[in-house]
Amino acid sequence: MKTTIEIPIGPQHPALHEPLMLRVRVDGECVEDVQVITGYNHRGIEKLGESRSFLQAMYVFGRVCGICNIVHQLTYVQVLEKIGGIEVLPRAKYLRSLVSELERIHSHLLVLAVEAEIMGFKGLFMLIMRDREPIMKLKEIVTGQRVIADYMWPGGVKRDINDEKVNIIRKTLRNLRERMKKYREVFSEDSTVLSRLADVGIIKKNEAIQYGLVGPTARGSGVETDIRVDEPYAAFDEVPVNIVVREEGDSLARMLVRVDEIFESINIIEYILDNLPSGPIAPKVLKRRYPKGEAISRSEAPRGELIYHMISRGGDKPYRVKVRTPSFPNILNGSRIAFRDAVLADVPVIFGSFDPCISCMERILVVNEKGEEKIVSIRELRK
Amino acid sequence: MSSIKAFFAEKGIGVIEKDRRIIVEVASDRLKDIINEIWTRYNNKAYLATITGIDYIDENVFELDYEIWFFDEKTLLVIKTKIPRNDPVIDSITDIIPGAIPYEQEIYDLLGIKFQKNKYLVKGFFVPKNILDSYPLRKDWQGEKR
């Protein structure tokens, strides 16, 4: 006899740390269907961006996501530069690539740790989180902030690095590379990891393309796509980038892609430090008004392709800013295909292998504060 | 000439090309056929990156930009189409591209454009319950009712 029952996982759940509900229909242990229920974490960033000036919006979009704030702000600034015809200074281009790779390393380390925790491998979680911390410190050394960096500037970046900082970066990355060799061994050989991840949540290559999956989730299914190579931005037209692709398409492949990408990012940063051009890092003139125009900017965030589409009608405010974050297709479309043939216990593991980031996916809605008379002006805030 | 430009030249549709972008504008009733042909011709060589909905309130139209990335050409094709603001209905492309489902859901929820034959459209996909009757990304949205 077939009895289907519905089990809600989330929005608050020990196995799923993000505000999202997976409505799982199961027959016994076997998953029949997973429905993703969204709408718990709306912040109205796109609408908010329309009501702020171009420069204020830069800070708004730098707060779409805490983990990938650098790449959000970078992509926003790139779209401004395209509309305003601003050339980026060579040293700033390299520094932009440097910080976005630092961000990729700590984001990938985070998801490796979180996935280990979901698997029930708490020891691995703690070890990886410990090794992530020095990278956060590096981010602070370079940008001045550990999390939200606000590092970008139209035409350049805000802070420079010197020899002392370069030495610290090199040393930390050398240590990390050694540690990562150990983690690669764990993720490719450990029996706990293999039994939880291998052959679980398979996404085939053609499905990944049909459903528009991006980033490590697509690369784990054999899709050769990486915006750093396909459409180089920042300094990636000069820095060699190898695309990491695996053919298996299971949860393990998605994690191993991330492990190998950390090695790749370390190589990229070392190349950048060896070849860092000298010169100024930011233009002297700051443009506040931008001409009429439309531009689309893409970049490779840690979770995949990030798109900013801006329409400017002149003046000091953008008319429309569309943000397509990588988790949007990965969570919503990935969930349509990856849970076939899964059992209930696999659901959090498969979901974790997408590197889900809810703030990355839900960012659109406006929540009006009650009592508008309480709103303080920017001038008052400055006091 | 890239094969995408040739594809539109065959149909007599003018394109604008600039740094890895090809921008075309098509009528909303032809859109589905064109996407279907592209999808058949470039099977598994292209993916739908996103759909952007824009409210041009002055011109009384909604614009939809279908953005498709071609792996081999390394080009982003932007197909623009306009629909009247007072009757915002267009055919869904989800039967051709299954990956379009959440993009259409998002636009329906925030801009109120109805995609015919997309059975997944639901109000409240992103919008909180207290403003379910309005479309916050429209330019004439007044904010939450008090």
Image (spheres, helix red, strand yellow):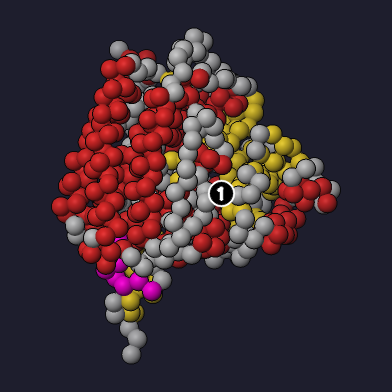
Looking at the picture, how far across and down is residue A382, in whole percent? 33, 15
- Main SS type for the magenta part? helix
Looking at the picture, how far across and down is residue A120, in whole percent? 19, 60
Q: Residue furthest top?
A: A284
A12 relative to A22 in the view: left or right: left
A270 relative to B85 in the view: left or right: left
**SS for callout 1:** strand
- Residue A160 in sight here: yes
Q: Give the magenta range.
A: A341-349
Q: Is residue A211 above or below residue A317?
A: below
Q: Quadrant of residue A268?
A: top left
- Residue A368 in sight here: no
The C terminus of chain A sits in image quarter: top left
Residue drawn at the location 35% of the way across and 36% of the way down? A266
Residue drawn at the location 34% of the way across and 59% of the way down? A252
Specify the subunit that label 1 lies on: B
> Which residue is more in the foreground, A161 or A58?
A161
Residue drawn at the location 22% of the way across and 63% of the way down? A192
Looking at the picture, how far across and down is residue B25, in whole percent? 73, 44
Q: Residue furthest left?
A: A123
Residue B5 in the magenta stretch? The answer is no
A50 relative to A104 in the view: left or right: right
Q: Quadrant of residue B80?
A: top right
Residue drawn at the location 64% of the way across and 28% of the way down? A293
Give the residue pinned by disc 1. Answer: B49
A369 relative to B116 in the view: left or right: left
Looking at the picture, how far across and down is residue A222, in whole percent? 49, 57
Q: Callout 1, which amino acid?
A: Ala
Q: Is residue A351 above or below residue A175?
A: below
